[in-house]
Structure formats: C-alpha cells, structure tokens
Amino acid sequence: MHVPDGFLDAPTSVATGVVAAGGVAVALRGARRELDERTAPLAGLTAAFVFAAQMINFPVAAGTSGHLIGGALTAVLVGPWTAVLCMTVVLLVQAVLFADGGLTALGTNTTLMGLVAVGVGYGTFRLLAAVLPRTRGGVLVAAGVGAFLSVPVAALAFVGLFAVGGVADVPVGTVAAAMVGVHLLIGLGEAVITVAVLGAVLTVRPDLVHGAAYLRRPADLARRPAPVETDSR
Amino acid sequence: MSAPRRARGLLLTGLLVALLVAGVGSWYASSSPDGLERTAQRTGFAATARDSATADSPLADYSVAGLGSDRISGGLAGVIGVTVTLVLAGGLTMLVRRRDRDRDRDPAGSGD
C-alpha cells in the first residue's frame, strides 16, 4: 500500500506529514512505558522482521499482489506506541534507500500504515481480547481479526485522502470499491501471517508478548526481575 | 541487565528468520502490482505517480546497482534493508526505553 509521490496534492501531503510527525512525537513518549532492557531489542528485531516480510508480495487475485503491513502484529508483540515507531522506521528506510513509497508521501504512508493500521489493529485486538477467553487462542483470534481489519481500513483512509487531495479526476466511489475489495483479500493474508508469527512467539516466549500480558499469572510475573514495590493486592 | 539466555535465543532466531525471508524468500515474491497500484491502474490514476527523489538510489526497487543476478541483487538488498532497519529501530528503542526499573509496569500489565 506504499503511496508513491504524485497521487496526492501538496497540501494533503503536508497535512499527513504533520499528522505523522505528531503521532510519532506522542509515540516517543508512550513507547517509554512499553520498552525496557528486555523488550527494546525485541522491538528492533520486530521492525527488521516487518521490513523483511513486506518484501514478500503474495498473489491475491488475477494480476494483483499484496504484502503484510505488520501494524497489528507489531502492536501486539511490542505495544502500540512502540509499533508506531517501528513502522515509521521501516517506512523511512523503504522510502529513502529503496525508493518504495514516495519521499513527499512519507507522511501519508506513516499515517496510513504507522498510525491507522496500528491503531485499528491494536484497538480491535484490545476490544476482542476483553471479551474472548483469556487463552492463547483468544489472543490469536483477537490479533487475527485486528490484523484483518487494519488493512481495508487503512485502504479506506487512503481513499479519504484521495477524496480530499487526489490529483487525478477519478470518481471516489470507484476508487473506494476497488481499494476496499482488493484489500479485504490482502487482509486475509495479513491475518494468516500475523497469527502464524504471533503463535510462534507465544509458544517460546509468551512473557515477552506485550498484548498477552493479561494472560500472565502471578506465578509467571514473580519470575521476572522483582520490582521494588510489593504487590499490595 | 543483560537479556536472559532464552531471550537471546529468540532474538537470534528472529534475526535469522528475518534475514532468510528478505535474502531468500524475496526470490519467490509475486511481482504483480500491489492492491494500490492495481487500483490506480484500473480506475485511471496510475499516471499521476511520479518517481521518488530517491529513484536513483543504488538500492532502488530492492536491487543492488551493478549486480547482475536478480536473486543475488534482490537478496542482498533485502539483507541490507533488514540490517539498516534493525540498527535504526533497535537504536531508537534502546534510546527511548525505560532505564529505572523501580517504576516497572503495573502488575495488570495494561501498560497503555
């Protein structure tokens, strides 16, 4: 879904740049609460993995492909604010070194894949995790649905930007139908990859998964480096 | 302090997987246009795309300039990308991370 230069006019690109910069600034503060000595290296690795996974375009329909966005996966693994930072680094590397996604569209791409995909993916995950059984299966279903939804919603967000600042004179409804249709299919791939990777990490190190923290029993917590204050409950 | 040994195992395994996905898995990636490109072609706004200012980058379009083989060129570009992303994102998260452990996250682990 990397938007190239030229699709959107300058005011829209500037506006999304401001939104993205604001989001990253807030994320820098929020990520401090999510990151410690144990999780910071994992966050760096998650970003590197997302970069790698985004290189793998899978076919979704005749003559069309898609790839993982990774917003939901990253948010569940390392936390939503950290995910915004990870996605931003991935998009920056892609735009600057690999000419994937325009430079003037970097704010747009960060908004779509860094903010919208992460926000929708993680928000959906938290909503579902609250009502689903507190099990590994519950975590995976919640993450899978979040991952699935994050893709068509990010596609719709692009359509919204196109409606406001698209350079071409194309009916917005036509663009919306095409974008949402194909990204529903890509969302299925997003869900499959997200569940597979998250399931693998949950198998070996459930204690490192941010989104699975609510599954931890006190006995598991006690094995972590002890906090100074005692648990009052 | 230093990461527990099993966390190091996960990190090394994850890095190996990322390098393999980017370095080898990318050979098998579909080269069809992605959802946005396809939409742009079908609905008629593909022509408004302009080349990025970085289009002449030696790594543009995930190939290393001057390397013949598609696979070696694409695989090496992927390995470089994974490495740069790891260094930048890892460096950023290590900078941002909480250092004082006495304000550890609450037991409920909501953390946000």
Image: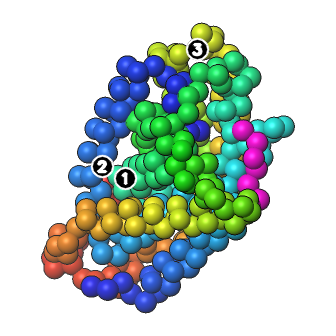
The location of residue A79, given as percent across then percent down, is 39, 58
Mark-to-mark CA distance, 3 and 1: 32 Å
Mark 3 residue type: Ala
What is the secondary structure assignment of the residue under circle 2? helix
Q: Which residue is mark 1?
A: A85
Viewer-proximal residue among A79 and A54: A54
In the figure, A81 relative to A108: above or below?
below
Where residue A27 is drawn, which disc sits there? 2
Labelled pair 2, 1 in contact (Cβ < 8 Å)? yes
Q: Quick one: quadrant of the N terminus of chain A?
A: top right
Asked whether residue A17 is drawn in magenta, I would say no
Mark 2 residue type: Ala
**Is residue A222 in sight in this rendering?**
no
Q: Is residue A199 left or right of residue B41?
A: left
**Mark 3 or 2: the one toward you:** 3
The location of residue B71, given as percent across then percent down, is 73, 63
Q: Residue at x 53, y 65 (%)?
A: B80
Q: Residue at x 45, y 63 (%)?
A: B84
Q: Is residue A43 left or right of residue B78?
A: left
Where residue A168 is drawn, which disc sits there? 3
Viewer-proximal residue among A28 and A135: A28
The location of residue A189, given as percent across then percent down, is 69, 50
Q: Quick one: quadrant of the C terminus of chain A?
A: bottom left
Write down the region rendered in magenta. Answer: B27-33
Q: Say whether disc 3 or disc 2 marks the residue closer to the N-terminus.
A: 2
Which chain is home to disc 2?
A
The location of residue A126, given as percent across then percent down, is 45, 50
* Residue A43 picture quarter: bottom left
